[in-house]
Each structure stands twice: as structure tokens, then as C-alpha cells.
Amino acid sequence: MVTDTTSRVSTSSHSMRRARPGSGGEPGSRGPKSVSPRALAALSPETLAPGALSPARLGQLVREIAAAQESWRPIVHFSAERRWYRRLVLAEDHEIWLLSWLPGQHTGFHDHGEARGAFAVAQGELRETLARPGRNRVRNRCASAGSVTAFGASHLHDVSNVTTTPAVSVHAYSPPLTAMRRYEMTASGLAMIGTDRAELDW
Ligand SMILES: [Fe+2]
């Protein structure tokens, strides 16, 4: 279930945490290892299949993994120091990440470069705040457990856990992320403040 609300963000009242290297967008992995190909094959036989993946197909993949709790519950970890994330799949044409969110943790505004994507909430609830460069207006959507959000390459958002309980989500991107631009709300609207690059920043 996804619900939409619209609001205008004030730079003085809205806390925008600047994304740190390695944690700018949702994904990023410093240290953690990917899940073995064998485990992935058991998880989803089609996960590593070649070919371009549409947002709808990415949505199917994240829905499937999020629903298979036995596949991610032994892996997931929660960290108060920084958001935790682990890449589950890295294929030529897509990648899949498992993320956890303690109350208050969020990504900050970011895009996904040229990648299309999707995310499924596996546990808890997340808020997605949508925005556009140069605009002050934002739109909030609450994504509860079981919901799937799929998007194209122009998607720009801030994802956060504004509840009092931990959340877990599964995210897929096609092609795999190479760069994500970070944004911050200013008095004149949403402005780009930097770029995080794969292998350098996550
Ligand atoms: Fe994102």
C-alpha cells in the first residue's frame, strides 16, 4: 500500500543530512561480501539472466526477494553508526541490494544516474520523498511492508524511516549503478551538491 501526500519543504525547518561518501544513495558497500552465486540461484533462478531489465521486471525481482524472508533474515544487520547495506546480486545488466533502516535513518536526496530501479519494503515502513531539481515542492509517499515502487532513470528521491521501528528493503537497479548525484534543498529549490561514484564512494 502506497499513499501520497504533497508538501513544500522549507530549508530552515527540514533537516537534510548531506550524504556521506559510501552512504550517499541507498546502496553502497564497504567491506561486506556479496552472496554466493549458489545462494542466489536458490533465491531466484532468473536473477542472473542476461538482458535489459525494465522497472516492472526489477519490481518483480525485489518483490520476490522481499517475500522470501528466509533469504534475507540471516543476512540483514542493523547499524546505528551508518545505514547498513549489502549487495545481493551483481550481474552485467542489473544489481540487487539489501538495506536496513533504523528509525531516523535516511538517504538524502539522490538520483541513480542512468539506472532504472525498484525497491520493495520487506519489513516495517519507509517514506519516499520525491522532488525535482530547481523546485521546492516535494511529494511524500509511505511505502509499507509488501509494497513495491518501480521507477525510471529520471527518478530522484529521499528514502527515510520516519517510524519508531526498524525497516528492511530490497533495491534493484538496471544497469548496475555507476554514479549517483546528491541533492540538497535550498531556498531556490533542490540543488545538486555532489556525485558519488561506484567503487570510489560505495
Ligand atoms: Fe534511491
Image (cartoon, helix red, strand yellow):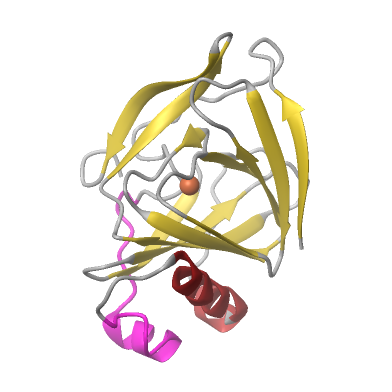
Residue sitting at x 31%, y 35%: 196
Q: Where residue 60 sits: x, y (%)?
A: 52, 76
The answer to whether residue 74 of the structure is visible from this angle is no
Q: Where residue 26 sits: x, y (%)?
A: 46, 47
- Decide: is 197 above or below 182: below
Side of 38 where 151 appears, left or right: right
Q: Is residue 42 magenta?
A: yes
Q: Quadrant of the N terminus?
A: bottom right
Residue sitting at x 50%, y 70%: 56
The answer to whether residue 117 of the structure is visible from this angle is yes
Q: Where residue 16 sits: x, y (%)?
A: 58, 23
The magenta region covers: 29-49
Q: Where residue 122 sits: x, y (%)?
A: 63, 67
Residue sitting at x 51%, y 80%: 71
- Decide: is 85 above or below 146: above
Q: Is residue 138 magenta?
A: no
Side of 116 where 142 appears, left or right: right
Q: Quadrant of the C terminus?
A: top left
How many marks are shown on the rendered structure? 0
- Decide: is 50 above or below 22: below
Front residue (pair 56, 40): 56
Front residue (pair 118, 72): 118
Residue sitting at x 34%, y 74%: 35
- Decide: is 48 above or below 96: below
* Helix, strand or loop: magenta stretch: loop
